[in-house]
Image (spheres, grey):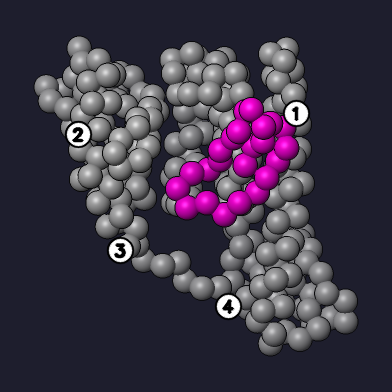
């Protein structure tokens, strides 16, 4: 079924704020779909207003919350890394093999094919874990900051100051922002995604500094700033499941 219109909407309910994907289609009834990753989709007929969809979500809030909670509780946990040679680590959409090297000096580096963890004791699990996580955090800071500086140039004419970057482990979103405090927070797992996917999230958050909502004006601005944002968003959702 062809989607005629797609936008992200958020409603306040007695169960808390619920964000969902609004879809206008050539259908007869309102349909609700909840994916295993917790994303919520509401499809409506062509002549049904967005406010009707909002009211529908509000009326179904308890069902939606219960379904999302059930999916989260039944989620198969990601296998714990052992931090041994041969395991994979993903950076900017590329899988690279871990290679553990016994070395008097402890650090992590990469040649684009392997990620080398230099460690005094190759059998010391926690040390290898900390070395790799610290290195990945450094990559997040470097790469995300570079992208933010590039994107910010387009928002200078709108009077947007360069914001503070914060990194977090998030389970349900790729990024968030506090326009009044000048802060953009990005999910650390974005480092696994291709660069254009990270750019999409950064553009999305910067647009909130001008339109702090998911209105038509917000998406119009996003379309102007990043015409292929839908493709990048879809690639991101296909690449990593939160």
**Is residue 149 in view?**
yes
The one nearer the camera, 24 or 228, is: 24
Against 149, is 210 above or below? Answer: above
Looking at marks 3 and 1 on the same chain, the residue that comes earlier in the sequence is marked by 3
Residue furthest to the left: 28
Q: Do the residues labelled 4 and 3 touch (CB within 8 Å)?
A: no
Examine the structure image and report whether residue 17 is included in the region drawn in magenta: no
- Residue 232: x, y in percent? 52, 33
Report, in whole angstroms, how far the alpha carbon at label 3 lies from the one at label 2: 25 Å
Q: Where does the magenta region start and end?
A: 163-185
Label 1 crowd (10 A; few <14 / some 14-19 / many >=20): some
Depth check, mark 4 against mark 3: the one in front is 3
Report, in whole angstroms, how far the alpha carbon at label 4 lies from the one at label 1: 39 Å
Tell me the quadrant of the picture where the N terminus can be found: top left
Depth check, mark 3 against mark 2: the one in front is 2
Q: Which mark is residue 74?
A: 3
- Residue 80: x, y in percent? 51, 73
Looking at marks 4 and 1 on the same chain, the residue that comes earlier in the sequence is marked by 4
Looking at marks 1 and 2 on the same chain, the residue that comes earlier in the sequence is marked by 2
What secondary structure is marked by label 1? loop
Kindly identify which residue carries mark 1.
162
């Amino acid at each position: 079924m062809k989607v005629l219109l797609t936008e992200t909407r958020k409603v306040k309910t007695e169960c808390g704020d619920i964000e969902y994907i609004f879809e206008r289609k050539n259908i007869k009834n309102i349909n609700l779909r909840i994916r295993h990753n917790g994303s919520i989709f509401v499809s409506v007929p062509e002549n049904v207003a967005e406010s009707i969809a909002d009211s529908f979500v509000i009326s179904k809030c308890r069902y939606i919350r219960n379904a999302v909670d059930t999916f989260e509780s039944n989620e198969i946990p990601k296998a714990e890394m052992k931090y041994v040679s041969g395991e994979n680590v993903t950076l900017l959409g590329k899988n690279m093999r871990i290679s553990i090297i016994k070395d008097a000096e402890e650090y992590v580096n990469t040649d684009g094919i392997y990620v080398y963890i230099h460690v005094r004791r190759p059998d010391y699990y926690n040390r290898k874990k900390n070395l790799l996580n610290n290195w990945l955090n450094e990559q997040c800071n470097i790469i995300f900051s570079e992208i933010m500086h590039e994107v910010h140039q387009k928002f200078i004419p709108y009077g947007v100051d360069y914001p503070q970057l914060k990194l977090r482990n998030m389970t349900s979103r790729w990024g968030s922002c506090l326009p009044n405090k000048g802060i953009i927070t990005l999910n650390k797992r974005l480092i696994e995604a291709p660069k254009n996917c990270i750019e999409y999230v950064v553009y999305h958050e910067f647009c909130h500094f001008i339109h702090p909502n998911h209105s038509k004006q917000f998406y119009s601005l996003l379309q102007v700033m990043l015409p292929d944002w839908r493709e990048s968003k879809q690639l991101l959702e296909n690449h990593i499941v939160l």
